[in-house]
Image (spheres, rainbow, N blue to C red):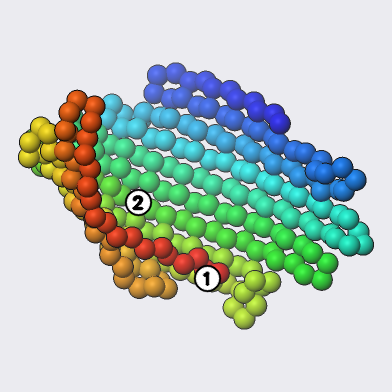
């Protein structure tokens, strides 16, 4: 294993670059070597007094080669590249607006004799979130997200090699402190998924500060899991 990291910057601009590699030769008397290499960059920028911009990007690559011929042979490779941007605007001492953008691509190859499963998947998303204090005792958060996913693989999806799905999500949460010892959180989320349709997930949590360092919490929530494109 090996890791190298360097950081530099000045007021309003900080950067960190990380490179890593991990590899091994597998079992004795059996060729099954693998190697993982990674490169990641993080930038923390402050373009304005009330603005923070975080940019992260990276690339990872994994390869595995096993060969016990004539009984077993397998080659697998995987590559991932991503870019994420997050901008935060402080509207005042308690309120802020957050916007995030993500783009991600994954390419994979999976080979056996007479069988292979190659493909590429991409996803992109946009998220907006606004948090503010309505009163001294009530704090609100609301926002939305759009996500697009696409997978292309002739080996996995023989009839229709390109599969796509869109997701729209809206959420909100309220934190109410009617008393210094009580905190009530209530919120929910509604999603429109291209496969499963519309789903909702409400929740409510009550916290009571019984003693210093001791809190009782009770709540009810519901959730759901979206299927993958393969499912």
Residue at image coords 92%, 62%: 70
Residue 78 at x, y percent in the picture: 67, 52
Residue at image coords 91%, 59%: 69
Q: Residues within 10 Å of mark 1 (few under 14, many from 20)?
A: few
Q: Which residue is mark 2?
A: 127
Q: Is residue 75 above or below residue 135?
A: below
Residue at image coords 72%, 53%: 77
Q: Quadrant of the N terminus?
A: top right
Which residue is outermost to the bottom?
159
Residue 173 at x, y percent in the picture: 21, 49
Please report whichever mark, 1 or 2, sits nearer to the chain's N-terminal start.
Answer: 2
**Horizontal side, residue 138 vs residue 82: left or right:** left
Residue at image coords 17%, 33%: 209
Q: Is residue 226 above or below residue 139?
A: below
* Mark 1 and mark 2: Cα distance apart in space: 25 Å
Residue 92 at x, y percent in the picture: 18, 32
Q: Which mark identifies residue 147?
A: none
Q: Nearer the viewer, residue 143 or 179?
A: 179
**Horizontal side, residue 188 vs residue 53: left or right:** left
> Which of the 4 quarters of the picture holds residue 138?
top left
**Horizontal side, residue 5 vs residue 12: left or right:** right
Which residue is outermost to the right?
70
Between disc 1 and disc 2, the foreground one is 1
Q: Which residue is mark 1?
A: 231
Residue 137 at x, y percent in the picture: 9, 38
């Amino acid at each position: 294993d090996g890791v190298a990291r360097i950081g530099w910057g000045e007021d309003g601009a900080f950067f960190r670059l990380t490179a890593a590699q991990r590899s091994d030769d597998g079992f004795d008397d059996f060729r099954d070597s693998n190697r993982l290499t990674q490169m990641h960059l993080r930038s923390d920028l402050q373009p304005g007094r009330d603005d923070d911009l975080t940019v992260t990007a990276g690339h990872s690559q994994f390869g595995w080669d096993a060969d016990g011929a004539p009984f077993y042979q397998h080659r697998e490779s995987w590559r991932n590249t991503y870019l994420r941007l997050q901008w935060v605007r402080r509207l005042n001492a308690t309120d802020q607006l957050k916007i995030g953008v993500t783009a991600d691509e994954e390419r994979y190859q999976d080979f056996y004799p007479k069988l292979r499963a190659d493909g590429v998947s991409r996803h992109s998303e946009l998220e907006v979130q606004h948090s503010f204090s309505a009163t001294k005792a009530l704090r609100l958060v609301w926002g939305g997200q759009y996500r697009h996913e696409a997978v292309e693989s002739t080996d996995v999806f023989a009839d229709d090699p390109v599969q796509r799905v869109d997701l729209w999500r809206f959420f909100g949460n309220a934190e109410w402190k009617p008393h210094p010892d009580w905190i009530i959180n209530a919120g929910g989320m509604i999603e429109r998924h291209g496969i499963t349709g519309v789903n909702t997930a409400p929740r409510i949590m009550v916290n009571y500060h019984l003693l210093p360092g001791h809190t009782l919490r009770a709540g009810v929530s519901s959730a759901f899991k979206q299927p993958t494109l393969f499912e």
